[in-house]
């Protein structure tokens, strides 16, 4: 699942950020409540395609004009792009579903082809709304192009990345101080008011769970139910614990390999191999020659700790790619040759290029997270090290930060039913975060999918549970029996693929 991708980025260059266009026509202004398909009568039919056109979906698209600075409505205005997958029934339920994307910086509209499939049963009688957060997708995107010459996006030159971002900041027609989660939640409320919708059902993935919680805090009476998939707890400063959580997820994966007879026999010392790789590349680099898996061109790469971290971090997101990690770690440690691991870094990082609006990422991070960044967390011994702290220290030293409510990171409660979802092997929003959210919200239930990674809603069993939850808006008596059959994918034991 794309969402997610993130909650931040590591020191491997702007292009290897995580946590995913259409030219849309503005719709005419409307007022008052509209029922069913009539509500979206002013929107234009559109097709949203992703993955090079291999996956697409039909929808209805439009834009909504809002002031960039809500306190100065006479000032600059921006257009927010959104897409709607109308309910298939002749008349939709009054409370649509809003999907809130990850990043920060992912386009919500570009998740529509995937999420419409995952939410197919709900889409029978409820509209699905995908609003691009300001600064993403078609909503005055804060995009920043890097050179695509080989391995530039795997560089560790933070000064170069900072210079490129400065140039982009000067070019954007935007005051980035107003591109925060709070303003994004205000935009969603404007959309709700514009269409006369009484209540919304919120589904947030990864960073989208922060957006869901901010909207819930500010507009609790407008929320009927909430699903948080890969939750970022209210108190969390995004990126501040990435090193710890990645190492923890990898250790859990290595433990799972040790408990699997075939994997344990093939890779008997994974924990030690991982520690050896971290130590080997902590201060030493290795020049290797690799062939780019997409272009077929060979080039020399400086294999560093950052490249190692990039490969393992992004492979750890998906339950399928997770199962390659034991083989790759074992091979790199035992042979001293990390070429195949470097190739995987190229594959997974290449897949994530252009998916995140990097400006929105820093607009959120430098305003909401960096000012009170925790100073008592030592991550120097982790694979990622202190790279997140170093990166934010560099960029946020000059980035124009916006205002954030004083209670932004203070826990709160709301009497709204909430379903919290976690993947057991999630490297960025682990089950512990789900437990933390469960302790905070009194009307909540937390489910952990065994052997799964980041974002679990696309799993058919989890999707069915979420469907039943949203229809009933009740956490009691949910049938979760299908989760007993959820488990990890088979481990890759050699180059031929996963074990049978």
Image: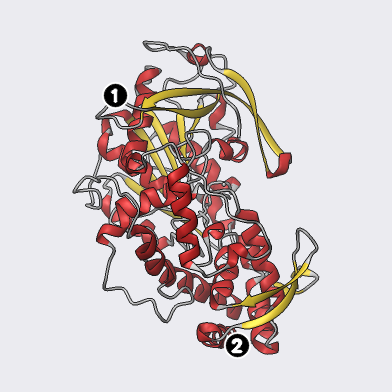
Way the structure is coloured:
secondary structure
Q: In the image, residue 486 lies at what x, y percent?
A: 58, 57
Q: Considering depth in this image, is 221 or 154 the residue closer to the camera?
A: 154
User: In this view of the protein, can residue 369 be seen by the observer?
Assistant: yes
Q: Residue drawn 56% across and 24% down?
A: 61
Viewed as shown, does residue 483 lie left or right of 68?
right
Q: In the image, residue 359 lies at what x, y percent?
A: 45, 48
Which quadrant of the figure contains the C terminus? bottom right
Look at the picture and state if 401 lies above or below 198: below
The residue singled out by tag 2 in the image is 269
The residue singled out by tag 1 in the image is 73
Q: Residue furthest left?
A: 406
Q: In the image, residue 234 lies at what x, y percent?
A: 30, 52
Q: Residue drawn 51% across and 69% down?
A: 157
In this rendering, which labeled residue sits more in front, label 2 or label 1? 1
Q: Secondary structure at mark 1?
A: loop
Viewed as shown, does residue 59 lie left or right of 92?
right
Q: Considering depth in this image, is 391 or 182 the residue closer to the camera?
A: 391
Q: Quadrant of residue 402?
A: top left
């Amino acid at each position: 699942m794309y969402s997610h991708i993130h909650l931040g980025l590591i020191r491997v260059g702007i292009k290897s950020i995580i946590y995913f266009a259409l030219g849309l026509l503005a719709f005419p202004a409307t007022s008052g409540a509209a029922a069913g398909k009539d509500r979206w009568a002013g929107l234009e039919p559109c097709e949203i395609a992703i993955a090079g056109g291999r996956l697409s979906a039909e929808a209805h698209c439009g834009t909504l004009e809002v002031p960039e600075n809500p306190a100065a409505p006479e000032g600059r205005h921006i257009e927010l792009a959104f897409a709607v997958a109308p309910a298939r029934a002749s008349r939709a339920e009054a409370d649509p579903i809003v999907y809130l994307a990850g990043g920060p910086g992912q386009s919500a509209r570009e998740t529509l082809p995937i999420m419409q499939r995952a939410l197919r049963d709900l889409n029978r009688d409820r509209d699905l709304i995908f609003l691009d957060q300001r600064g993403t997708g078609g909503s005055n995107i804060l995009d920043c192009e890097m050179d695509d010459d080989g391995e530039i996006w795997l560089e560790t030159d933070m000064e170069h990345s900072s210079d490129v971002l400065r140039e982009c900041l000067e070019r954007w027609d935007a005051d980035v101080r107003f591109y925060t989660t709070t303003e994004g939640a205000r935009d969603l409320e404007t959309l709700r008011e514009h269409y006369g919708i009484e209540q919304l059902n919120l589904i947030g993935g990864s960073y989208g769970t922060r957006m869901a919680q901010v909207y819930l805090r500010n507009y609790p009476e407008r929320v009927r139910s909430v699903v948080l998939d890969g939750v970022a707890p209210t108190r969390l400063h995004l990126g501040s614990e990435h090193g710890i959580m990645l190492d923890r997820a990898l250790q859990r994966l290595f433990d799972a390999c040790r408990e699997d007879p075939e994997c344990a026999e093939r890779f008997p010392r994974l924990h030690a191999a991982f520690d050896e790789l971290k130590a080997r590349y902590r201060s030493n680099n290795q020049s290797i020659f690799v062939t780019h898996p997409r272009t077929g061109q060979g080039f020399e790469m400086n294999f560093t700790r950052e490249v190692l971290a990039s490969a393992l971090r992004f492979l750890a997101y998906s339950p399928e790619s997770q199962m390659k990690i034991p083989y790759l770690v074992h091979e790199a440690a035992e042979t001293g040759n990390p070429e195949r691991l470097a190739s995987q870094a190229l594959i997974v990082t290449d897949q994530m290029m252009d998916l995140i609006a990097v400006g929105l990422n820093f607009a959120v991070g430098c305003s909401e997270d960096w000012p009170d960044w925790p100073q008592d967390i030592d991550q120097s011994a982790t694979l990622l090290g202190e790279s997140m702290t170093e990166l934010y220290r560099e960029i946020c030293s000059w980035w124009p930060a916006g205002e954030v409510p004083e209670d932004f990171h203070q826990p709160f409660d709301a009497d709204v039913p909430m379903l919290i979802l976690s993947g057991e092997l999630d490297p960025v929003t682990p089950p512990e975060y789900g437990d933390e959210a469960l302790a905070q919200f009194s009307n909540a239930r937390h489910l952990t999918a065994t052997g799964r990674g980041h974002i679990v809603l696309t799993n058919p069993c989890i999707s069915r549970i979420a469907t039943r939850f949203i229809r009933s808006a009740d956490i009691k008596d949910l049938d979760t029996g299908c989760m007993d059959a959820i488990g990890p994918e088979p481990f890759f034991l050699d180059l031929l693929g996963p074990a049978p």
